[in-house]
Image (cartoon, grey):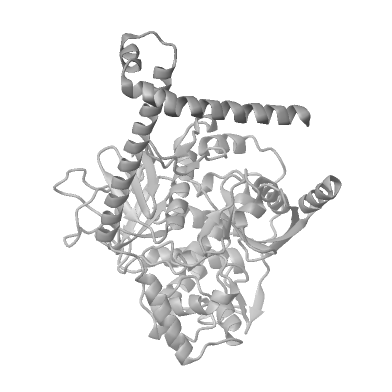
Amino acid sequence: MLSRLMSGSSRSLEREYSCTVRLLDDSEYTCTIQRDAKGQYLFDLLCHHLNLLEKDYFGIRFVDPDKQRHWLEFTKSVVKQLRSQPPFTMCFRVKFYPADPAALKEEITRYLVFLQIKRDLYHGRLLCKTSDAALLAAYILQAEIGDYDPGKHPEGYSSKFQFFPKHSEKLEKKIAEIHKTELSGQTPATSELNFLRKAQTLETYGVDPHPCKDVSGNAAFLAFTPFGFVVLQGNKRVHFIKWNEVTKLKFEGKTFYLYEKKIILTYFAPTPEACKHLWKCGIENQAFYKLEKSSQVRTVSSSNLFFKGSRFRYSGRVAKEVMESSAKIKREPPEIHRAGMVPSRSCPSITHGPRLSSVPRTRRRAVHISIMEGLESLRDSAHSTPVRSSSHGDTFLPHVRGSRADSNERVAVIADEAYSPADSMLPTPVAEHSLELMLLSRQINGATCSIEEEKESEASTPTAAEMEALGGELRALCQGHGGPEEEQVNKFVLSVLRLLLVTMGLLFVLLLLLIILTESDLDIAFFRDIRQTPEFEQFHYQYFCPLRRWFACKIRSVVSLLIDT
């Protein structure tokens, strides 16, 4: 029997699982891993496939069965983290955005960061004014199709590409004009480098938004950037706190707390799992960008004095160590296999990341609401609550520096419309059975769908009644989050229950300690007086002595059983 158990256990450990990782250029890397393989093993396989040495900026993201996104932890088993049925599907993404992407040592690293920021631009996570949007899109064109050629690029060729969630004909013409007149002769590497330098200066560079609600029930997006903690609300950046000013991050259930030197920010996540993910992302980003050495990393707990809570420890290197290690790289630059161009009606299409849009021009204009216009200056927020705002630093966005006086606060306006990234509420990747829900959510939010999504949904397009039912379910999900008053009541009740439990526990421990000391041979006047009372003698002979004999008998029987075996 023992041999069968051992053989079954070894077969279980030797079982292989298929893993598919979607890369930043939308290609896929497939491999097999053992049951007990750690996340570090899979990540190293992937980086070897990409010929990537500056790998600390990247990570692997996956979605659990409850549709909650997570970053793969490298010190834990891949199979145990995913908790889903194989084959496993994950995504390779930038986890820590470089503070200065142009300073990256190798071109392959800059190229991968370029692909990530291009995705951010397409999905509405990176917002900018019209002139900056046109320049960024022109850099993408130059990097992927080269110099303007009248024979290959007819009038309106820039409209064949979808760089943003929505854009106008005026913006398309501006993109083509810059591509024709200003970028001729730039190599793909040069265009990508200029793209990174421009993107780095934008307010929402490096933002991976987490949807939350503030204490008033207003929607907000929380994010962690290379420079600090950011809160985006409406069309403004209402909070920016540098990493050296953040003293503590904590969560309890759905409630997330950020402690600054003078204030405490409180926000409510949609679910406890989303709140824990937000907390872990904050812990990792603070450690990566703030600390000088990885040896300074400490295990962080979300608990209070009496309750254990969640514990987490960042396991990688910090930004300063990564830069020092990159400076020591001495190898021939690896060859970069940029995705090839596929002609479509005499116009090439972007074959990775945001692809050629199949939405007709008339339909695009019908749903057009530009989110890139009107960011020429900063404005006071007369209709919102005054909040702190400060810049990233002297070398980044000096025009965003707000007044530190409490009576004259400023907020950074990031767009004319509310900040609403298209995919921030959706898992990455999206499961096939939830594709219709994803398409419906985009229609409700006014976002266009890509050609791949429309093709995938053609085979199983729901009827009007089904769409209406799905819409009701989606709105119910969106409205399912309880109000802040309910959260505060639940928090108060939980605190009272904790206090009662802790008090009862302390009383029980003190009583047990008193009994032990009284029954001991300590010759102290206090204990002698207690032993001489009739109540103690009754307790001693009726309860304590029988209980002691029972324990002694059980211990002897266990010892004799162990000796016999």
Residue 235 locus on image (x, y percent): 30, 64
At horizontal 60% and vertical 28% (from top left) the residue drawn is 553
- Would you say residue 546 is visible in this rendering? yes
Asked whether 90 or 415 is in front, the reply is 90
Asked whether 96 or 174 is in front, the reply is 96
* 110 left or right, relative to 524: right
At horizontal 68% and vertical 50% (from top left) the residue drawn is 47
- Would you say residue 447 is visible in this rendering? no
* 328 left or right, relative to 167: right
* 376 left or right, relative to 345: left
Residue 125 locus on image (x, y percent): 44, 62
Above or below residue 48? Residue 195 is: below
> In which image quadrant can residue 406 be found?
top left
Furthest-bottom residue in view? Answer: 464
Residue 393 locus on image (x, y percent): 35, 42
Asked whether 329 or 284 is in front, the reply is 284
At horizontal 45% and vertical 26% (from top left) the residue drawn is 544
Asked whether 123 or 294 is in front, the reply is 294
Above or below residue 70? Residue 245 is: above
